[in-house]
Image: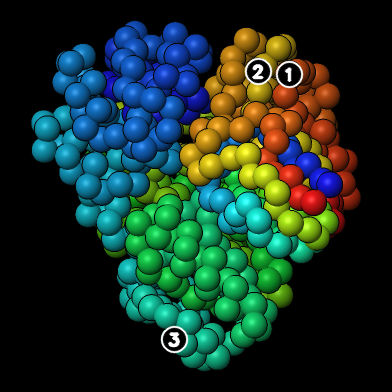
Amino acid sequence: MLVANRGEIARRVIATARRMGIRAVAVYSEADAELPYVREADEAVPIGPPPPARSYLDAAAILRAARDTGARAIHPGYGFLSENAGFARQVTEAGLTWVGPSASAIEQMGDKISARNLMAAAGVPVADGTTTPVSDLEAALAAAALIGYPVMVKAAAGGGGIGMSAAADPEQLVAAFETARSRAERFFGSPAILLERYVTPARHVEVQILGLADGRVLALGERDCSVQRRHQKVAEETPSPGVGPGLRARMLDAAVRAGETVGYQGAGTVEFLVDQRTGDFTFLEMNTRLQVEHPVTEMVTGIDLVEQQLRIAAGGGVSFDPAAVTATGHAIELRVYAEDPARFLPSPGTITAWDEPAGEGIRVDAGYMAGNQVTPFYDPLLAKLCVWGPDRDEALSRARAAVASFRITGLKTNLPFHADLLDSGEFTDGGYDTLVISRLRP
Amino acid sequence: MAEVRAEMVANVWKVVTAEGEEVSDGSTLVILESMKMEIPVLAEEPGTVTKLAVGEGDVVQEGDLIAIIE
């Protein structure tokens, strides 16, 4: 199997493949030749220069590497080509197995406007918003007047928080629309814009689903991803301290319905916003791939999600009894980024020392080691520090100790921010929402 | 005179100003891109851009000169 990705996720996928006796092929750009995942693969193929468009997004180069190495399947990881329906189709047309949902499921969920419409028709709650692309500022102002301020402006083909911004009044909408518009063209190649009611205060809670080869869709619990900066996640936990049994049951049910609506196969994530004022939830989007924060679900369920992806892609059954899934204890993931811990600005550089915490309940999914260079070409994720405890308090105290003993030198990291987060009353009492970081770092 | 320097390793995505242009405090001079983030580099005082040391597509290192404002 070829892994069409880099860094920590390539390493993590390769580890499960090798454990299952599957030979793993890594691909790498000129910037990544020294990274651990390249060394740990059975074979590694250079695919181009550092800019993503000329390496990890170069479908032809990746398919060539698959052909040259005799790979029979491609795992896309997350980001890059993972939610590119055209690439999924090219992979299957080349006679290879695509480790992911069908191209049509990716397509239906990839456009945020069509996804919203589809979910509304399936009875999944969506926030008030536009049902067709908003083409110009005049249409945006008219739509916002109907929805009511504040509104969220997004690229319909977007993701990763890029180009997304909220507007509290028509004046802010002018700027938000312009930002969304230019980012949409530049990053996602489509100018289509979507307006939605901006739910605030809110928690960002998502449900892990698994579409089985026999057509059943399972929900494997939720993850709270409300700790965000620039609309990008920084820490996640399961179970969500803000979700009670009734709400959880309704969200899991809605997520299963979302998966069933598109005939979903494999691992996917349905994201929701929970309105802190009303306690209601609305559909945000579906990520048709393995999620960055999947380890917290693995830690409480004991299920290796990559293994299930590979089994399902091969047309087989999963390794556990779908009727007997239980979640035990509490798990937290802290994303360790190469960025300064105050303003969160990127901090590329060379890693001079790297000492990971270890011990009971500690898992580190790292993309780098000492001596590696962290370049400006890719996202700043260095490692995911994942911590499990029998309950939330124990998980928090293990997380504090783990953060204190994680030593990375040579560049700035956000570990000091994580220490502050774990000590903040708002996070430890569990009542936080998506604006928690803006209060911790005003 | 003020020298504007890069705060980090980055690619120069967009050059917004030009040599000879009058800028005010807080005007965007260039937009850098690093680790999937756009970072606007702003003028910290009003004046004239007498030197622009970078072009679109250049890679700057931390501390590299971007522009001089007089």
Same-subunit check for callouts 2 and 3: yes
Q: CA distance from mark 1 to mark 3?
A: 49 Å
Dot 2 alpha-carbon crowd within 10 angstroms: few under 14, some 14 to 19, many 20 or more? some
Q: Secondary structure at mark 3?
A: helix
Cα–Cα span, label 2 and label 3: 48 Å
- Judging by the rendered image, the residue that carries numbered circle 3 is A139
Residue type, mark 2 in image:
Thr
Q: Which residue is mark 1?
A: A410
At mark 1, the secondary structure is loop
Mark 1 or 2 closer to N-term? 2
Side of A96 relative to B38 (left or right): left
Judging by the rendered image, the residue that carries numbered circle 2 is A350
- In the rendering, at what x and y percent does residue A376 appear? 57, 32
Instruction: Tell me if residue A160 comes above or below residue A253 in the rendering.
Output: above
Q: Are marks 2 and 3 in contact (CB under 8 Å)?
A: no
Number of on-image labels: 3
Q: Nearer the viewer, residue A222 or A289?
A: A289
Using a 10 Å C-alpha cutoff, classify the residue at mark 1 as few (fewer than 14 neighbours), some (14 to 19) or many (20 or more): some
- Nearest to the observer: residue A30 or residue A321: A30
**Rendered view: A5 above or below A425:** above
Which SS class for mark 2? strand
- Asked if the residue under mark 2 is in contact with the one under mark 1, i.e. CB atoms within 8 Å, the reply is yes
Q: Chain of mark 1?
A: A
Quarter placement of the C terminus of chain A: bottom right
Tell me which corner region of the image, top left, top right, bottom left or bottom right, holds residue A54. Answer: top left
